[in-house]
Image: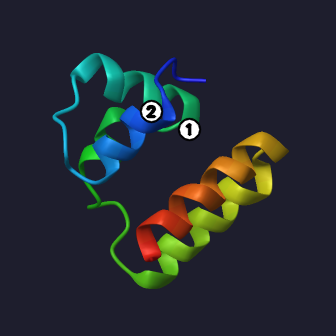
Amino acid sequence: QAGISGKYLGEVERGEVNVSVVILSKIALVFGVSMNDILTFDHLSTREDMESELFKIINTADEKSIQQIYRIITAITK
């Protein structure tokens, strides 16, 4: 949805490539968050806050987005 390949996104997630502001803004748009949300985590100060926000995202996502979220989370936690 952001117009980038899964391979490139994986490289970004693993810190293997530098990401441009343009790409970050596309990713933010797809996930319905601000650039500030991507770059900072000040608004989520506790585990409970983060869990609550994750549940909100998951509960409002369509099936394709759920699949993408699942892939991202499982890749990060392996």
**Residue 62 appears anywhere in the view:** no
Residue that numbered label 2 is attached to: 28
As displayed, is residue 41 above or below residue 37? below
How packed mark 2 is, by other alpha carbons closer than 10 Å (few <14, some 14-19, many 20 or more), is some
Please give the label number shown on residue 9.
none
For residue 34, side relative to residue 73 (left or right)? left
**Residue 70 appears anywhere in the view:** yes
Residue 53, horizontal then vertical, whole percent? 57, 63
Residue 29, horizontal then vertical, whole percent? 51, 26
Residue 46, horizontal then vertical, whole percent? 38, 81
Residue drawn at the location 34% of the way across and 60% of the way down = 43
**Of the residues shown, which amino acid type is indicated by label 1?**
Phe
Q: State yes or no: discs 1 and 2 in contact (Cβ < 8 Å).
A: yes
Q: Quadrant of residue 20?
A: top left
Residue that numbered label 1 is attached to: 31
**Of the residues shown, which amino acid type is indicated by label 2?**
Ala
Give the image's coloring scheme.
Answer: rainbow
